[in-house]
Image (cartoon, rainbow, N blue to C red):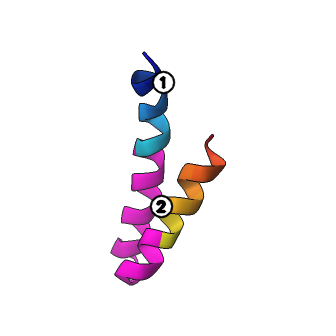
Amino acid sequence: MQAIEQMPVLVAAAQYSLLYLLCGGGLFGAAVIYVVAKSLGR
């Protein structure tokens, strides 16, 4: 059940990092944004 509750946080974090990549950002920056967005979603 806990995995289902955390799924929207993972999807939102992935969306932010994907948007960063599409706007011309690098892979390292996308990884940093993913980790930060995931930790803020807790």
Q: Secondary structure at mark 2?
A: helix
Examine the rendered structure and indicate whether residue 2 appears above or below residue 41. above
Residue at figure coordinates x 47%, y 32% from the top left: 6
| Residue type at the position of mark 2 | Tyr
- Residue that numbered label 1 is attached to: 5
Magenta stretch: dominant SS? helix
Residue 1 belongs to magenta span: no
Residue designated by label 2: 34
What is the residue that sits farthest to the front in this orientation?
Answer: 2
Q: Residue at x 60, y 51 (%)?
A: 39
Q: Residue at x 50, y 40 (%)?
A: 9
Left or right: residue 19 versus residue 42 is left
At 41% from the left and 54% from the top, the residue drawn is: 15
The first of marks 2 and 1 along the sequence is 1
Outermost residue to the top: 1
User: Which residues are drawn in magenta?
Assistant: 11-31
* Residue 42 lies in quadrant: top right
- The x and y percentages for residue 13 are 47, 52
Badge 1: few (under 14), some or many (20 or more) residues near its Cα, within 10 Å? few
- Measured along the vertical axis of the image, is residue 27 above or below residue 41? below
Q: Determine the CA span between mark 2 and mark 1.
A: 18 Å
Query: Residue flagged by tag 1: what amino acid is it?
Result: Glu
In the rendered view, tell whether residue 18 sits above or below residue 25: above
Horizontal arrangement in the rendering, residue 15 relative to residue 9 (left or right): left
Side (left or right) of 35 relative to 15: right
Q: Nearer the viewer, residue 26 or 28?
A: 28
Percent across and percent down for residue 29 are 47, 79
Q: Is residue 21 magenta?
A: yes
